[in-house]
Amino acid sequence: MQKHEGTQAKTPAWVPSVRIMQLTILDPNNPYEDFPSLSQALRDPDGLLAVGGCLSKTRLLKAYRNGIFPWYNPEDPILWWSPDPRLVLFPDKLIVSRSLRKTLRQNKFSVTFDLAFDKVINACAALRKDSSGTWITDEITEAYSELHRLGFAHSVEAWRNGTLVGGLYGVALGQVFFGESMFHTMTDASKVAFVSLVEQLKLWDYQLIDCQVHTRHLESLGAQEIDRAYFVELLNQYCDTAANKSAWKL
């Protein structure tokens, strides 16, 4: 789950136009067109694979299934990435610090699932605009909101006295959850949302959480880097295996 969390927020790397010209250009009118082989991804910037295309359901789901995600600045064309190594969290490897356990015991926040997707993605976008700019453009918001309406994108919300104070969203395929972004306006709110998500994913038979690129924040919660080739093996193993029938039906 990259590109997030206040001071650790990441924005897409600036990519010289000469580098973009070296990339495969995807047809925006053909979302069924295959992505290039991941072996063609650049090393600098790490994982940059292709440019163009569209943000349709077909294109986005094809991307996630193959270990690829969109990430670009508002002034750029759509850029597609598959970094190596890849940051992931195996649900059983979740680390909850003593202080976070104390917060959880205090029940400061109430946590819900898929109750306020639009509010979560807009809050993630707003937080970026207040800092170093946002990669969550109107185009991204519309695309992922459509995935949510179709049952592929999901949100987790943390509330305090009826006010949304933290949350996250991502995409679910089979037994894999692909984290996209998270935000908080109160200390520990997004961490509580994340821990609640992981514990729920365990009950739903999920095997992997994609966190995309390294942050200290996620590493502190148990995320680890693995080779891209191994990541693809895991996707092949788990993306086409159904999660528990109760998943996302809270």
Image: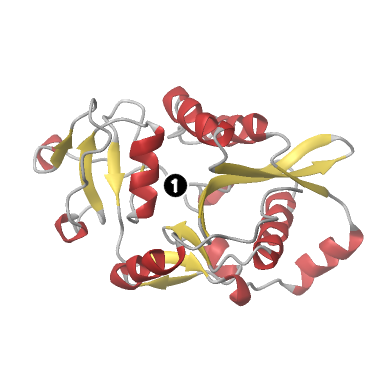
Q: Nearer the viewer, residue 204 or 110?
A: 204
Q: Which residue lies furthest to the bottom in this view?
A: 93
Q: Where is residue 207 in the image (x, y as percent from the top left)?
A: 54, 69
- At 28% from the left edge and 70% from the top edge, which residue is drawn? 229
Q: Is residue 35 visible?
A: yes
- At 54% from the left edge and 60% from the top edge, which residue is drawn? 242
Q: Where is residue 113 in the image (x, y as percent from the top left)?
A: 72, 45
- At 40% from the left edge and 44% from the top edge, which residue is drawn? 61
- At 90% from the left edge and 60% from the top edge, which residue is drawn? 106
Check disc 1 and give the amino acid type: Lys
Colouring chosen for the image of the structure:
secondary structure
Residue 181, by quadrant, is top right
**Crowd rating for badge 1 (residues with CA inside 10 Å; few <14, some 14–19, many 20+):** some
Task: Using the image, determine if residue 6 lies above or below residue 53.
Answer: below
Q: Nearer the viewer, residue 118 or 96?
A: 118
Residue 20, by quadrant, is top left
For the residue labelled by badge 1, is the local secondary structure a helix, a strand or a loop? loop
Q: Where is residue 32 in the image (x, y as percent from the top left)?
A: 26, 38
Q: Can residue 69 be seen in this view?
A: no
Residue 163, by quadrant, is top right
Q: Position of residue 17 (x, y in %)?
A: 14, 35
Residue at which label 1 appears: 10
